[in-house]
Image: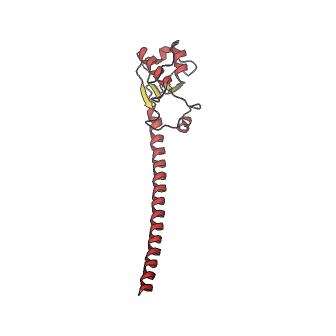
Amino acid sequence: MFTSFNFSNRRLDKVGIFVSIFMKKKTIIAIVLLFLFAFFVQEKVVEQDIRKAIVSYNNNPSFTKETITEADFDGAAVTIFTAVWCGYCKGAKQLLDEKGITYFEVDVEEYNISKRKLKEIGIEDFFVPQIFVDGVPIGGFSDLKKIFGSDMPVPKVS
């Protein structure tokens, strides 16, 4: 009887080990599938948001990045891509506020906007801020300062 008892315990141990290994594999597979799903869903959300985020009141503006002037901001839609940690972003927003220009702000981290997605819409060297006037990319804080003839320093972010 004692031998039989040991045999059944060994058999139960082998079954337990098999079940344990099987459950670990299922857990790993479930985790991998969850990560893959999250990645693909995230990409779709970013893809949909990026093009809709750039506001334009005039589909055929009369200016380019090279020819834009301060007067071109009158009645134009301004979109600015920012990040909370960015001093240049803070400066661009302050300069627009000083000039009384209303803008639409898009936080690149909040909307998870990648460099790749911005490249798809024509932004080659991604940095923040990225400023669009009626859909025309005009650049960042330094470009905005040139347009307005400002010597505003880069503000510190607290």
| Place of residue 90 in the rendered image (x, y in percent of width and height, measured from the top left) | 46, 22
| Place of residue 41 in the rendered image (x, y in percent of width and height, measured from the top left) | 45, 47
Task: Identify the residue at image location x=54%, y=29%.
Answer: 127
Q: Residue 105, can we see it?
A: yes
Q: Is residue 47 above or below residue 38?
A: above
Q: Quadrant of residue 97?
A: top left
Point out the residue furthest to the front here. Answer: 2
Point out the residue furthest to the bottom here. Answer: 1
Q: Is residue 64 above or below residue 8?
A: above
Q: Where, quadrant-wise, is the N terminus in this rendering?
A: bottom left
Q: Quadrant of residue 143?
A: top right
- The tally of labels here is 0
Direction from residue 103 to residue 63 in the image, left or right: right
Q: Is residue 129 above or below residue 94?
A: below
| Place of residue 147 in the rendered image (x, y in percent of width and height, measured from the top left) | 53, 15
| Place of residue 121 in the rendered image (x, y in percent of width and height, measured from the top left) | 54, 34
- Residue toward you, 88 or 3: 3
Scheme of image coloration: secondary structure
Task: Identify the residue at image location x=46%, y=26%.
Answer: 80
- Residue toward you, 134 or 85: 85
- Residue toward you, 21 or 139: 21
Q: Where, quadrant-wise, is the C terminus in this rendering?
A: top left
Q: Residue 99, can we see it?
A: no
Q: Is residue 147 above or below residue 109?
A: above
